[in-house]
Amino acid sequence: MEEKENVLPGMAQDGIHAGFPSPATDYMTQAIDLNKELVKHPAATFYGRVVGDSMIDAGVEEGDILVIDRSLEPQNGNMAVCFIDGEFTLKHIHIDGSSLTLVPANPKYPEIKVEEGMDFKMWGVVTYVIKKVR
Amino acid sequence: MYALVDCNNFFVSCERVFQPQLEGRAVVVLSNNDGCVVARSNESKAMGIKMGTPFFKVKHFVDNGALEVRSSNYALYGDLSHRVMSILAEAVPQIEIYSIDEAYLHLDGIPMDKVPELCRGLVEKVRMWVGIPVSIGVAPTKTLAKIASHFAKTYKGYKGVCLIDTETKMYKALELTPIEDVWGVGRKLAPKMKEKGITSALDFVNRPREWVRANFNLPGIRTWEELQGRACIEDEREERRKSICTSRSFADMISDEEELSLRVSDFAAKCACKLREEGSAAYDVTTFLYTNRFREDLKQYFPSATIRLQVPANSTQEIVGTALKAFRMMYRPEYMYKKAGVIVSNIVPSDAVQASLFDDNEELRSKQERLSRVMDAVNSAGNSLLRLAAQRPGHYSDGIRSEHRSRLYSTSMDDIIEVH
């Protein structure tokens, strides 16, 4: 194996300045990165777009973007993306012992009790809802 | 000890993550241009559909609803592969990414009694986090690990993890493994083996060493040793292939991702330049990081990740891009790093490079080569004047036929899943 110790070609940290250095240099830090704030597990995070109004009373409207973290164990009261009857659905999940109920946030829609043998899959827990307001 | 992690029916599994209705159905994924079958679900394997079958021969199954078909969606598979590999890379000190759906984990330093728990945890984690089922085979050599992973995949009772950690298990596994399924034997050698009365891996191992040498030369001996738990593929390869390493200790410890990735890019660019100087190209790109081992008060982390390219490369773009990909897999912000480096290995003469079956970037590759030559010419005048901007994976599917392609669920905002 050939080990080659390199000398890094001189790269000026903040460009090349003539005259006085900027007094702001000492205070430089990284800007806020929403990816880091909203995505705690990048390998497990996916996004979804809301269609319809089944969660309208929870403030979730058509077109909102969901941040879905599949690494989280679903807990009672979580908002979750589930796959049922051939489509993805967004619901609150109510866990009572071994029974699981999908609860919409809109009185127009029924609650769904998940029964043995149903074509059902818990897909991921929603951690944030991103809404465009103008 | 090695663990081979193999994603089950990877392309099909990727499709199923975002289309759970495909679960339990017969599914095939087609090659570029929708030519032939390149991936099959267990159900389509059971229907007798073989790898490489031209699509028109199975189209009638699609028409009568017995088979689901998808065009290959490499952007999707690449993203999910990256997610799987980064979960694996965080779990062990060293990983060799062997292909889009396989990686060898080096388990040295992990107590043997902790290994089953670690592997079962990984199977569960990858399934939950990414939605991809994987099988893990653990054994003292890579050849045996491959056999173990096959058992883990084939027999449900293993729950995804099979260990060959005793002689008894080893001989049992060899007895059950047809010779053509052994890594390194393949379709080319299998007929010759069978001619000589060898049908299982055990038959081969039972032949004397001298007989193996006389009939199958050094590669045969290597496989023969590996099958008996004596690792030699790694060592042999180290001898045969040269590698180029560019690394450096930093004056101050660095934790910042941006700054480290700049250093890694620089090391990788130096390696690429060196490869072009000597007219060679490399299959493997390794990035490694060291924390400061003399600072016992700080948390220590010495990860390395290797990515195997489908076609050996020496372009700055490809080597830098690959080194950065490896870097991002294992970088963790909570450590202070003292040293980093890039190694290119498994080196071949660049005029011997052949495009592989799945390599569809021929045009892009030749563009990259031209650009690299220009960069070399300019840079030879002085100190690395020309540098690359950030590397981004391209998308080269223009003009390629893909009538059944699913959406870019995880890489394009316009294609994310709809939730009702």
Image (cartoon, rainbow, N blue to C red):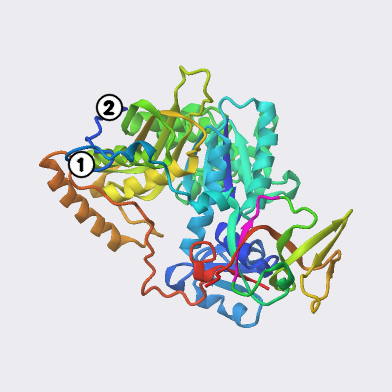
What residue sits right under mark 1 in the picture? Answer: A16
- Residue A42 image position (x, y, % from top left): 55, 50
The answer, for residue B198, to whether it is visible in the render is: no
Quadrant housing residue B257: top left
Report the side of B167 relative to B306 (left or right): right
- Chain at numbered mark 1: A
Q: CA distance from mark 2 to mark 1?
A: 26 Å
Task: For mark 2, name the chain.
Answer: A
Q: Is-magenta flag for residue B188?
A: no
Q: Residue at x 48, y 66 (%)?
A: B412
Magenta span? A64-72
Q: Can residue A9 be seen by looking at this rendering?
A: yes
Residue B76's x, y, as percent? 51, 62
- Residue B331 position (above or below residue B133): above
Q: Nearer the viewer, residue A126 or A56?
A: A56
Residue in the image at 65% along x and 54% along y: A70
Is disc 2 in the same subunit as disc 1?
Answer: yes
Q: Nearer the viewer, residue B361 or B34?
A: B361
On the image, which quarter does residue B179 sit in? Answer: top right
- Residue type at tag 1: Ile
Q: Residue A54, how many percent across, how many down?
A: 73, 74
Residue at the spot 39% in from the left edge and 73% down from the top edge: B400
Tell me which numbered mark, 2 or 1, is placed earlier along the sequence: 2
Residue on which disc 2 sits: A5
Mark 2 or 1: the one toward you: 1
Q: Could you tell whether B282 is left or right of B418 in the image?
A: left
Please tell me which residue lies in front, A73 or B154: A73
Q: How many marks?
A: 2
For mark 1, give the secondary structure: loop
Q: The C terminus of chain B is located in which quarter?
A: bottom right
